[in-house]
Image (cartoon, rainbow, N blue to C red):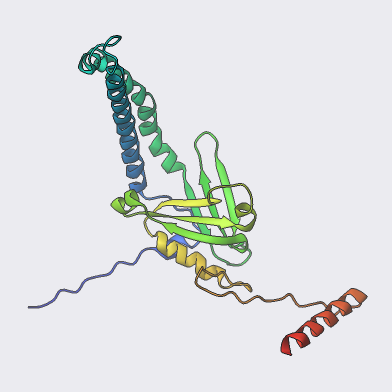
Amino acid sequence: MVEKEVKVIKPPVERITSGKIFRPSRAYLYKMWLQGLIAAFLIWAITILCFIGFAYLLATDPAKHPAAEIIIARYWNPINYWTITLNLVWLIPYMIFAPTYVNKIEYSVKSESGGTMPEVYVKKGIVTISRKHVPFRTITNIESKAGPFDRMFGIGSVSIETAGYSGSQATGPEVKLEGILFYEEVRDFILNELRKYRAPYVTGTEIAKIEEEPVPRGPGLDDEILITLREIRDLLKNK
């Protein structure tokens, strides 16, 4: 039996990491739609369950309230109607504006080439548009993530934190590239670019070698004192 050759199609990482603008996959929109429908269903289900539980709680006092079945039969239709109506109030605009939101998203990962500063660029928003430029030299942490819905649609995200942002009161990453098909390749590309710097980026399993800035040997008493102190320190370490 002759085995057929399997052609491996590599992801277009060169196009994504060349500094050109790229957008999330269409699957990201499908994920948002699915999440919206599930959220609406959960709101409906929780409301109905709370209503049924409240009806049985009232029925524990038969002197003041009728049986739970009577309460449920009496108020089922209005509770169900208003729950669905209020759900549709937010769900319909969400489903309509989700494609516009996804189409407005722009990503760019620029490596060092000529006068271009290596950076990650993210643009998001419909009414309020935010544009963030994150230089590679400020990045302190990179995380790739693919949740259950992401894996269902074959996409993932890359979260990026910087020194100033992670030290503030912020609870999430500074920028997040969501809905990317080749998110792992984008993450690896950024990591490789960061390792080109003098102080390389390290992951949690690597040991970073601390490099000191060379002391300028120009004229000045402060420079000489600093050099002498470092020499004394090195001598003490060798003993």
Height in image: 180 above or below 223? above
Height in image: 93 above or below 11? above
- The outermost residue toward the left is 1
Question: Who's the residue at 36% across and 47% down the image?
Answer: 28
The one of 22 and 151 positioned closer to us in this rendering: 151
Residue 166 position, x and y percent, is: 60, 54
Quadrant in the picture for the C terminus: bottom right
Residue 83 position, x and y percent, is: 32, 22
The one of 226 and 159 positioned closer to us in this rendering: 226
Residue 165 position, x and y percent, is: 61, 52
- The outermost residue toward the top is 64
In the image: residue 194, left or right of residue 212: left
Question: Who's the residue at 15% across and 74% down the image?
Answer: 4
Residue 7 in view (yes/no): yes
In the image: residue 197, left or right of residue 12: right
Quadrant in the picture for the N terminus: bottom left
In the image: residue 209, left or right of residue 142: right
Instruction: Place residue 140 in its image quadrant.
Output: bottom right
Residue 172 position, x and y percent, is: 53, 49
